[in-house]
């Protein structure tokens, strides 16, 4: 049902969604106008491409144009409507029985013309009520945009942590399998250490799992609060009466709420030293040299790595072109049998790839992170956050980023490739039960520091 306030507006200044005058109006490509808050709330949970509520024209992007002319007509109309309200709504001065048309900046109160010239207020700054109301209304619109931006950020954070939450138990179980596979290779007396390591890993995994669950719950709850505040601010913007107290209350409450947006959790499991592992691996030590005759730069692989760095949450990050001094390198040796261990110094490089690939990849330039017969460990840097992946298939590893020397162990007959954090004498990850029937060649790529 339309209010008296709305009935005084020309139809071209009425939003067809909320049936009220425009709040922060925008014009879609099809020519129809709506309130920005109305479209935001209407399209929030739309799974398909958003469309115009009137003509159903598809609008794939939020490329709205602000309707500046509407504001020039809306403001005078608001003033005329105030004059048509019942006398009870005009906020009459109880002393002089005239309308309070001025706002005292010092006392934060409404005054009539006579009160504004009284000795009590004569030295204070006074402003017309309509001017003050529009000033606070503009501040509310800015707060609404800020709230909505925070809500979208919160939604992205929910998606990010939910994706981790879904695979977390599987990752912990896989991590336990990989850790457990290392211990049969050492002496029997290490069985007690192995059991302790696995028990602590299982307990730590459950603790992090519960923290992830609470992290998601807090962000979902914050999303509901942000939407409620956003709707309350929208309703406040549409009010014809000037309630300065409400303006202050909602304005500062929305500011306070934005200070407590929960951030997505970045889970990491502890890494434990495995006694005797490096001593055992050094029995198979080889020294890998680089083959500078292989000029294949694998542009496709480095571009694929950049796409991994520029995730959906960081689409606006600049993409630096690959440097000629950071091109991929191949080892001079190939392996077709036996056990081999070597170490690679990645230093403080923010992004790097090391591992083994099928020999035939040296003559091709279309290798991607999802290509078969590549066994790589990747460190990917997004802003100041580092992530570890192994491939193929592409799998994240939620442990601390290794720096300095990384060990690579190949057991060709058993189909095992392991990556070792030399400084900590701990396992990073491994490939188990693979079947190799082709030559494997070491692969190294270190990005800028």
Image: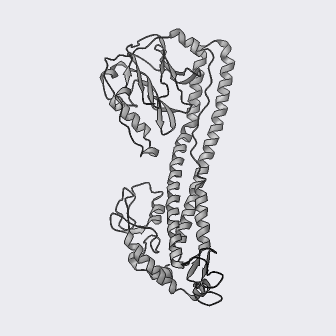
Picture quarter containing residue 203? top right
Question: Residue 413's x, y, as percent?
Answer: 47, 13
Picture quarter containing residue 174? top right
Question: Residue 418's x, y, as percent?
Answer: 51, 20
Residue 332 appears left or right of 126: left
Colouring scheme, one of rainbow, by chain, secondary structure, one colour: one colour
- Taking 353 as reference, is 386 above or below it? below
- Taking 352 as reference, is 227 above or below it? below
Rendered residue at 56%/81% (across/down): 102
Question: Residue 171's x, y, as percent?
Answer: 55, 33
- Taking 137 as reference, is 364 above or below it? above
Rendered residue at 50%/11% (across/down): 285
Residue 343 appears left or right of 323: right
Picture quarter containing residue 308? top left
Rendered residue at 54%/27% (across/down): 402
Residue 408 appears left or right of 257: left
Question: Residue 276's x, y, as percent?
Answer: 61, 14
Instruction: Report the front residue among 342 and 220.
Output: 342
Instruction: Report the front residue among 133 and 374.
Output: 133
Instruction: Report the front residue among 280 and 91.
Output: 91
Rendered residue at 47%/20% (across/down): 344
- Number of marks in the rendered image: 0
């Amino acid at each position: 049902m339309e209010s008296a306030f709305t009935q005084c507006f020309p139809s071209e200044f009425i939003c067809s969604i909320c049936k009220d005058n425009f709040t922060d109006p925008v014009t879609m490509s099809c020519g129809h106008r709506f309130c920005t808050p109305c479209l935001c709330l209407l399209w929030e949970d739309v799974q398909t491409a958003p469309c115009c509520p009137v003509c159903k024209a598809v609008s794939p992007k939020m490329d709205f144009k602000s309707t500046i002319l509407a504001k020039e007509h809306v403001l005078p109309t608001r003033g005329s409507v105030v004059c048509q309200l019942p006398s009870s709504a005009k906020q009459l001065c109880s002393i002089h029985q005239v309308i309070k048309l001025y706002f005292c900046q010092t006392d934060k109160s409404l005054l009539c013309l006579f009160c504004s010239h009284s000795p009590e207020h004569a030295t204070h700054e006074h402003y017309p009520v309509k001017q003050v109301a529009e000033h606070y209304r503009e501040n509310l619109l800015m707060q609404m945009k800020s709230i909505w931006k925070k809500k979208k950020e919160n939604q992205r954070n929910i998606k990010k942590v939910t994706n981790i939450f879904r695979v977390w138990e599987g990752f912990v179980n896989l991590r336990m399998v990989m850790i457990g596979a290392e211990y049969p290779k050492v002496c029997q007396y290490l069985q007690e250490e192995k059991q302790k390591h696995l028990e602590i890993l299982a307990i730590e995994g459950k603790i992090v799992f519960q923290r992830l669950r609470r992290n998601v719950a807090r962000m979902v709850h914050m999303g509901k609060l942000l939407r409620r505040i956003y709707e309350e601010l929208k309703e406040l913007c549409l009010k014809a009466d000037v309630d300065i107290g409400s303006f202050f209350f909602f304005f500062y409450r929305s500011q306070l709420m934005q200070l407590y947006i929960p951030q997505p959790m970045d889970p990491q499991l502890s890494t434990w030293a495995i006694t005797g592992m490096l001593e055992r691996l050094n029995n198979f030590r080889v020294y890998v040299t680089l083959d500078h005759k292989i000029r294949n730069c694998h542009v496709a692989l480095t571009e694929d790595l950049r796409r991994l760095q520029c995730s959906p949450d960081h689409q606006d990050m600049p993409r630096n072109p690959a440097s000629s001094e950071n091109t991929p390198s191949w080892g001079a040796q190939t392996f077709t049998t036996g056990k081999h261990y070597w170490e690679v110094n990645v230093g403080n490089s923010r992004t790097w790839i090391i591992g083994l690939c099928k020999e035939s990849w040296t003559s091709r330039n279309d290798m991607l992170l999802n290509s078969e017969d590549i066994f790589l460990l990747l460190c990917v840097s997004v802003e100041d956050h580092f992530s570890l992946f192994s491939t193929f298939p592409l799998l994240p590893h939620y442990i601390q980023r290794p720096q300095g020397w990384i060990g690579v162990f190949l057991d060709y007959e058993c189909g095992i490739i392991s990556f070792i954090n030399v400084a900590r004498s701990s396992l990073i990850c491994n490939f188990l039960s693979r079947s190799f029937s082709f030559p494997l060649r070491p692969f190294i790529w270190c990005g800028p520091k």
